[in-house]
Image (cartoon, grey):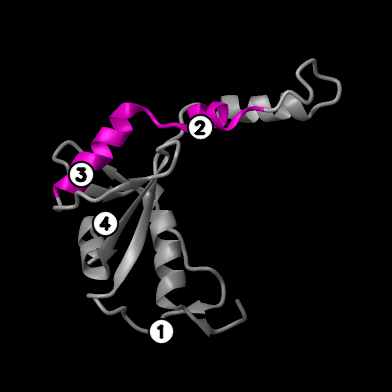
Amino acid sequence: MKKDTPITMRSFLTFALIVAGGVFSKDADRRYKLKESVSSPRGWIKHSSPDPDHAINLRIGLPQPKFALLEQNLYEVSDPFHERYGQHLSKEEVEALVAPHQESIETVKDWLASYGIEHIEYSPAKDWVKIRVTVKEAEEMLNTV
């Protein structure tokens, strides 16, 4: 982005939601606490507030507890000196290695249900959740109001 380019609603929300996936944690009373704060990318400026009724696709990334194992597999099959060289993983094997714990899936599903959201789309490995909400709903869910 060139210097002083206004933040579009889409770019801001994409940035905010990617960041939000990892910066909030729940305490014992189920409220969110800010874990980390990040600055806007260099050259971004606030343009205006988005229309609260504008619908967006919100994507939520779930933790991938076996990601290190996936990375190890990728190095092994890519190393010409390793015995597994060229033995690439199948789509199903990759999905199994990026799949979140079932508890993570259920926790997010319950959290979304608490906001009345029942239509949820999952990636094949269920490591990404996609919902359609308004800006207002997203702000309430992520406690950014």
Which three-letter amino acid code belongs to the residue tagged 3? Trp
Q: Earlier in the sequence, mark 3 or mark 1?
A: 1
109 inside magenta stretch: yes
> Residue 70: which quarter of the image?
top right
Q: Which residue is mark 4?
A: 142
Q: Which mark is residue 95?
A: 2
Q: Nearer the viewer, mark 2 or mark 1?
A: 2
Q: Looking at the picture, does residue 122 appear above or below residue 15?
A: above
Whether residues under marks 1 and 4 lie with C-beta atoms below 8 angstroms apart, the answer is no
Image quadrant holding the C terminus, namely: bottom left
Outermost residue, top direction? Answer: 83
Disc 3 versus disc 4: nearer the observer:
3
Measure the alpha-carbon separation of dots 1 and 4: 21 Å
Q: Which residues are magenta?
A: 89-114
Q: Mark 1 or mark 4: which comes first in sequence?
A: 1
Label 3 sits on residue: 111
Count of picture labels:
4
Residue 95 belongs to magenta span? yes
In the structure shown, which secondary structural element does the residue marked by tag 4 occupy? loop
Q: Name the residue rendered at 24%, 41% in the picture.
A: 109
Label 2 amino acid?
Glu
Q: Residues within 10 Å of mark 1 (few under 14, many from 20)?
A: few
- Residue beneath label 1, please? 47
Crowd rating for badge 4 (residues with CA inside 10 Å; few <14, some 14–19, many 20+): some
